[in-house]
Image (cartoon, helix red, strand yellow):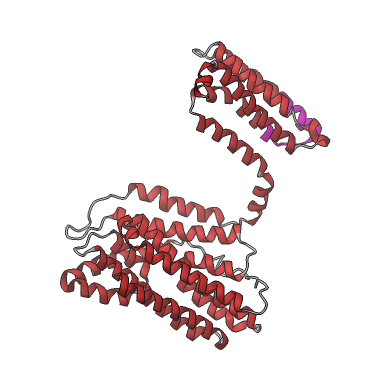
Amino acid sequence: MAEFIAFIPEKLIQFILVTLLSLVIGLAQRRLHTEKDEFKVFGTDRTFTFIGILGYILYIVDDKTLLPYLGGWLTLSVLLVIYYIFKHKELNTYGITTIVVGLITYCIPPLVITQPAWLYILVVVTVLIFSELKSSFVEISQKFDKDEFITLAKFLIIAGVILPIVPDKQIVPFINLTPFNVWIAVVVISAISYLSYLLRKFVFAKSGIIISGVLGGIYSSTATTVVLSRKSKNLSNQNEVHQYASAIILSMAVMYFRILVLMTIFNIQLAAYLLPVFLIMIVFSTIWGIAIFFKAEKRNVVEDDKIMIDKNPLEFRVAIIFTLLFIAFSFINYYVIETFGVSGLNVLSWIVGFIDIDPFLLNIFQGKYDVKSNAIALATFQAIISNNILKTGYAMIFARKSLRKPIITGMGAIILVNAILLLFFL
C-alpha cells in the first residue's frame, strides 16, 4: 500500500485533501441552513469546495511571492463584503460566521501544503464543532451571571500572571520552600475547585443530590458532609435520607481520587507506590455509596436545590489562607521531623486531620524531608483517616437521626478498611 501511495503525485494528494476538507466544511454549512433560508447565505457545499480549490490553484501558481494567492484572498474578501452589505440591507441581519468560515476554507490549501496533517485536520474539526455548537453556546451564555467572567479572570491571574513571575528560590536556606512551590500548590487547588464549580453550574446544573455529593467531593468532602448533613434535617421521606447518605459516602470516594491526583502531580513516585491502596479505597467507598442508594425502596432522584454552586471557589481570601497554612506547615513539618523524627510526623498527621489536610499533604508531597517514602505514605493515610473521623463527628452532630446510622456505618467501614490497609500495606 505504501509503495502504491509513493507513485501517486504529491500535488494530486494535496488537491484531493483540499477538495474533501473544503467539501466537508461546505456540507456542514448546508446542514446548518435549511432550503428555506439558503438564499440568506452566499453558498454551501459546492461554493465552499470551489473556494478551497481556488485557494489551492492560486497558491501553487506562485508559492514564492504568493501574489496570486493574496490577490485571490483580497478579491474573495471584497465579494464577501459586498454580500454582507446587501444581506444587511435586505434582511437586516448582522451575522458573519459563514463569511469567516469561507475565509478559513480559503486558507486550507496552504495548511495542507506546508503544515503537518494533525494541524489542518484540527482546524477543520474545530470549525465543524464550533459551527454545530451555536445553540449550545447560547444556552451556556444564558447561565452566566455578571460575576462569572470575574471568577475566570481571577483564575487566569492566579495561574497565568502570578505563577510565571514568582521566583523559584528558597525563602530560607534550611527548608525546601520557594514562592513557586507555594503558588503552584495554590494554582492546583484552585484549578480543582474551579473545575468542580464549572461542572456543577454548567454541566450538571439540574442534577440530583448524588451528583452534588460527587462534585462536592472534588471541592471538599468535609464541607459536603456538613452541608448535606444539615440539609437532611428538612427531609421527611426515608428514601431521600438514603440518597443524602449515599451522596456523602460518594463524596469520600471522590476525596480519595482527588488526593491521588494531587499526589500524582507533586510526587509521582509516591503515587505509584500508593496506587493499589487508593484504588481499593476508591472502589470500596463507591460500592458502599451505591449500595446505600439502592437500599432505598424507591429510588426517584432527589433534586438538588443548588447546594454550594453559587460559592465562589476563587476568592483571594481563600487563596491567602491556603498560602499561609502551606507556609506554616513547611516550618511545622521541618521542626517536627528534625526534632522528633518519624514519630513526630505521625502524631502531627493525626492532628492535621482535624484542621485542613490539603496544605499538609501538598507540603509533604513536595517537601524533601529527611524521611523515607513509606513514612510519608503512612502520614498521608493517617491524616486521611483522622479527617474521616472528623467528618463522622460532623455527621453525628448535624444530621437527622435517621441519617446518622447509614452515614456512620458507611464512614466507619471506610475508616476500618483504610486502617487495615495501612497496617498490612504500609
Query: Is residue 337 a member of the stretch shown in magenta?
Result: no
Magenta region's main secondary structure? helix
| Residue 262 on image: x %, y % | 38, 59
The image quadrant of residue 73 is top right
Residue at 27 percent of width and 66 percent of height: 376
Residue at 34 percent of width and 59 percent of height: 271
**From where the camera sits, is residue 99 visible?**
no
Q: In the displayed structure, would residue 119 be above or below residue 114? A: below
| Residue 33 on image: x %, y % | 76, 37
In the rendered image, the residue lying farthest to the right is 36
Toward the viewer: 135 or 343?
343
The image quadrant of residue 258 is bottom left
Residue at 38 percent of width and 74 percent of height: 418
Q: Is residue 129 left or right of residue 386?
A: right
Quadrant including the C terminus: bottom left
Image: magenta residue range: 83-99
| Residue 340 on image: x %, y % | 17, 74
| Residue 180 on image: x %, y % | 31, 53
Q: Is residue 172 left or right of residue 100?
A: left
Residue at 53 percent of width and 20 percent of height: 4
